[in-house]
Image (cartoon, grey):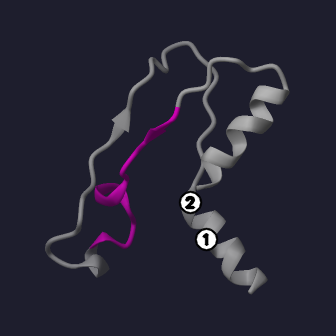
């Protein structure tokens, strides 16, 4: 996962406390009508307090698309 690969880079840059989470955006997709009547919704897990903290969002779809372009 791209987010996991970013952690060591951020730590080397001096950031010590790095939390990660997963945000499921299935119900907010613009192509929800094409997914079908029963989309697979996964749980959102954010185990760290994100209030008043810097936040980086990593979209795994962009990462997957980049990998496919390289193959």
The structure residue drawn at horizontal position 14% and vertical position 75%, both measured from the top left corner, is 37
**Rendered location of residue 41, percent (x, y):** 24, 58
Q: Are marks 1 and 2 in contact (CB under 8 Å)?
A: yes
Which quadrant holds the N terminus? Answer: bottom right
**Disc 1: CA contacts within 10 A as few (<14), some (14-19) or many (>=20):** few
Percent across and percent down for residue 47 are 39, 26
19 up-or-down from 53: above or below: below
Task: Give the residue at x 71% y 43%.
Answer: 6
Q: Nearer the viewer, residue 28 or 1?
A: 1
Q: What residue is shown at x 67% (from left), y 81% (from top)? A: 68
Q: Is residue 27 above or below residue 50?
A: below
Q: Tag 1's secondary structure?
A: helix
The foreground one among 51 and 15 is 15
State which region is magenta: 20-32
User: Please, which residue is most extreme toward the top here?
Assistant: 52
Label annotation for residue 12: none
Q: Is residue 13 left or right of residue 62?
A: right
The residue under label 2 is: 60
Relative image position of residue 28 (x, y in whole percent)? 34, 56
| 71 to 62, vertically: above or below | below
Q: Quadrant of residue 21?
A: top left
Report x, y in % for residue 43.
27, 47
Name the residue nearer the viewer: 46 or 28. 46
Q: In the picture, which quadrant includes the C terminus?
A: bottom right
Numbered label tally: 2
Which residue is tagged 1? 64
Give the quarter of the image for residue 22: top left
């Amino acid at each position: 996962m791209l987010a996991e690969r970013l952690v060591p880079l951020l730590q080397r840059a001096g950031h010590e406390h790095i939390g990660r989470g997963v945000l499921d955006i299935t119900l907010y997709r613009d192509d929800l009508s094409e997914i079908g009547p029963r989309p697979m919704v996964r749980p959102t897990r954010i185990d760290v307090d994100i209030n008043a903290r810097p936040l980086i969002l990593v979209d795994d779809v962009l990462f997957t698309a980049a990998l496919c372009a390289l193959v």
